[in-house]
Image (tube, grey):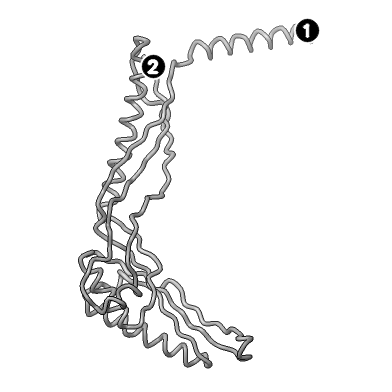
Amino acid sequence: MKKSFLIIATFLAIAVQAQEQKNQVPQISVTGEGKVKIVPDQAVVTVGFQNSGKDAKEVKTLNDEVVDKVIKFLKKSGIPATDYKTNNVSLYKSYDYEKKKYNFQASQNLSITLKDLSKYDDIMMELNDAGVNSINGVEFKSSKMEDYEREARKKAIQNAKQKAQDYVSVLNQKVGKALLITDNSQTYIPQPMYKGGMMAMAADGGAQRETLAVGELEINTNVSVTFALE
């Protein structure tokens, strides 16, 4: 009985395997890359300021005064309240071993979205006058980023299909429908470098000069596609 059951099970396994091989669709798997280069039209500038002193209340008050000046200036410049925000605030005590006394330091960072890059230099100078003493970073963006990302994705699929066609053309076969698409893209977008800073502008005595090198952004999209062969 056991022997008969084993024979039947083996027969069924062979039949299933033969059916799977019969139904297997000839296919090819390739990767595709889509690149789109754009000139950014926006920037997110992160600026900071700090004050130190013997009294915690005193340094916090000094920081609050800077915040008040900065926000009033941004409103006066026509920058919407939705385009700037506080990233972090800190107030801490440190000990000076040489002078053998405690000091307090208050600091704050703000991120400001500039939708008109031509105003960059003027705004940075005014922020410097308001008490901002450091630029912590500039991130360039595009107001049409989603449109460019769609374009990059389409280019990646087109690139993958062209690759598949190149491979199978010598075999007298054709590329059929896509069986599987995997998005391997990462969100990292190379950023152009910015030049200048609060110290450079202060040393310039307020003279007008260009301190921002916008450059280009490059959006990269990568996909893996499996096509059926005809």
Q: Is residue 147 above or below residue 106?
A: above
Pick the residue in front: 19 or 224: 224
Label 2 secondary element: strand
Residue at the spot 38% in from the left edge and 65% down from the top edge: 137
Pick the residue in front: 98 or 58: 98
Residue 184, given in percent of the width and then of the height, sits at: 44, 39
Q: Quadrant of the C terminus?
A: top left
In the rendered structure, the answer to whether residue 177 lies left or right of residue 123 reads right
Residue 222 position by quadrant: top left
Q: Residues within 10 Å of mark 1 (few under 14, many from 20)?
A: few
Residue 8, given in percent of the width and then of the height, sits at: 69, 8
Amino acid type assigned to the residue bearing label 2 in the image: Leu
Q: Residues within 10 Å of mark 2 (few under 14, many from 20)?
A: some
Residue at the spot 44% in from the left edge and 81% down from the top edge: 50
Numbered circle sitting on residue 43: none
In the rendered structure, the answer to whether residue 117 lies left or right of residue 110 reads left
Residue at the spot 33% in from the left edge and 32% down from the top edge: 157
Q: Quadrant of the N terminus?
A: top right
Q: CA distance from mark 1 to mark 2?
A: 43 Å
Q: Is residue 155 above or below residue 88?
A: above
Label 1 secondary element: helix
Q: Which residue is mark 2?
A: 229
Number of numbered discs visible in the structure rendering: 2
Residue at the spot 40% in from the left edge and 20% down from the top edge: 228
Amino acid type assigned to the residue bearing label 1 in the image: Lys
Residue 182, given in percent of the width and then of the height, sits at: 43, 35
Nearer mark to the viewer, of 1 and 2: 2
Pick the residue in front: 197 or 53: 197
Residue 180, given in percent of the width and then of the height, sits at: 43, 29
For marks 1 and 2 on the same chain, the one whose residue lies earlier in the sequence = 1
Q: Which residue is mark 1?
A: 3
Q: Is residue 152 above or below residue 1?
A: below
